[in-house]
Amino acid sequence: MSVLALPASALASLGRATFNALAAIGRIAIYAALTLWHIVRPPFYRREFFTALMQVGWLSLPVVGLTAIFTGGALALQIYAGGQRFSAEAVVPQIVAIGMVRELGPVLVGLMIAARVTSSIAAEIATMKVTEQIDALTTLSTNPMKYLTVPRVLAGFLTVPLLVGVGDIIGIMGGFLVSTEQLGFNRASYIKNTVDFLQTPDVVSSLIKGAVFGFIATLIGCYYGMNSGRGAQGVGSATKNAVATASILILAANFVLTSVMFGS
Amino acid sequence: MIELSRVAKSFGKNHVLRGVNLTIPRGQSMVVIGGSGTGKSVLLKSILGLVTPDSGRITLDGADVREANRDAFLARFGMLFQGGALFDSLRVWENVAFRLMRGATKLPKDQARAIAIEKLRRVGLKPETADLFPGELSGGMQKRVGLARAIAAEPEIIFFDEPTTGLDPIMSGVINALIREIVTEMGATAMTITHDMSSVRAIADRVAMLHDGLIRWTGPVADMDQADDPYLQQFIHGRADGPIESVR
């Protein structure tokens, strides 16, 4: 065996993985473009859209609320403890507010949606594919893209910003509760500091991130579901890959959006 | 009339169809037989456009199916899928009335429901079944609902994909008899794929045997037993010995 065989093989594997990743990005981009194309063209399935609104939005509220309240509380403790090192513990309300609204609120809600909604969409559509329900839709003159993907993606795009807004408020409340009940902050001044410090661009950026993350989470769930392999293993792989891809894309999109909106 | 001319389809190195020629005359019930994995489902899905053939031509009444208006083309078809392929999230009647409640010829909900219940009755299911979900039905009942959905819009052409797979012999006989009755009373063109010989004898006007990606034999069902093709004889008598390898 040549000395160069091992490095060459490793290089080939790396090359293959890179090509595969680029091809996957290309396929997802084409799928996203097709989704947008279908969103603006009838027919529009209202019932499926309202069902998706419930699934993506309303039923995600408990997990979003619990995630946000614990994160807000922990954030307040961390900022207080860190701030004490240079006598800046008074900035807790401001940092909790900006931390939740600009970063933690949208990102945590996005990741929770990836865990709860992306997985559920991918598993449901993949099962439909495996049991030939997608083929059945086609033979019944119904475009699966319009019937399955469009309502879910539109629901994600519209409801996740609302969830992020709710998550931001509950997260700030979590910080408020810990700060006032445990750390001795005055309630009125905590609220005043929070409200005075937050600016409109902070809130708008949070909602924009929510819309983008909602679009990504639902689109990726649909994409992997529609492209699932056969059998139980195919459904499992589709679900796993959907959650992993959606989570990474949400974090990457968060970096890009933060750079664009606050980089300068 | 449906005509397939030199239709070929491969998945990677697996050449499933190698140039299939087959004619399904209008108003006839054609049953395609063949072992598992011989490409029967791919053949059927190629006609419907669910699978795109690599080469060859498929025509419906002389017109190439690839050039047809998709909605108008599919509106002429009904299909019973192997596992039923019922939509889990919809009630039984909504499954049956799915096509009736959508598209250019959309019917009001009450009318669609009434037709669905009538079709359910036609396949031997009580009206109470209409409001159940597919998950609450037995395998045989799901097949019947699938059959009701396939005939709900009274299509000219009906495809049946392994209609008796997974059913006990009595229920298989019931489904076979239903298919025969419905195809005859609707005057529909039917294409069934199966490896169940009781289905073949109950449903078929004509039989075609698919083997190794090609139509090995085709003819009227009455001629099947007398045919001298060794592949066909091995298959219809279920013999382990013969030209078809038992380990595939």
Image (tube, coloured by chain):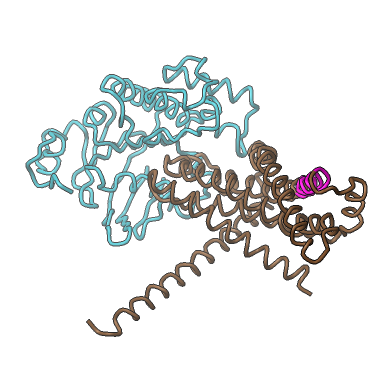
Magenta-drawn stretch contains B92:
no
The residue lying furthest to the left in this view is B241
Q: Position of residue A240 (x, y in %)?
A: 48, 51
Q: Please tell me which residue lies in front, A117 or A107.
A: A107
Q: What is the quadrant of residue B24 in the picture?
A: top left
Q: Is residue B52 left or right of residue A102?
A: left
Residue B8 x %, y %: 31, 57
* Number of numbered discs: 0
Residue A25 visible from this viewpoint: yes
Front one among B24 and A80? A80
Inspect this view and state whether residue A208 appears: no
Residue at image point 9% right, 43% down: B230
Colour brown maps to chain = A
Question: Quick one: which residue is furthest to the bottom in this view?
Answer: A3
Say whether residue A40 is left or right of residue B151.
Answer: right
Quarter of the image that includes the C terminus of chain A: bottom right
In this orientation, which residue lies closer to the viewer: A62 or A250? A62
Q: Nearer the viewer, residue A220 or B43?
A: A220
Residue lying at 87% horizontally and 53% vertically, measured from the top left? A194
Whole-percent x, y for residue A105 in the image = 72, 53
Principal secondary structure, stretch drawn in magenta: helix
Q: Which residues are magenta?
A: A168-181
Q: Quadrant of residue B2?
A: top left
Residue drawn at x 51%, y 44% as measured from the top left: A125
> Where in the figure is residue B100, as x and y percent of width and height?
57, 31
Position above or below: A34 against A225:
below
- Above or below: residue A33 compared with residue A48: below
Task: Say which colour chain B has.
Answer: cyan
Residue B146 lies, with reference to residue A124, above or below; the image says above
Image quadrant occupied by the N terminus of chain A: bottom left
The residue at the point 21 percent across, 33 percent down is B221
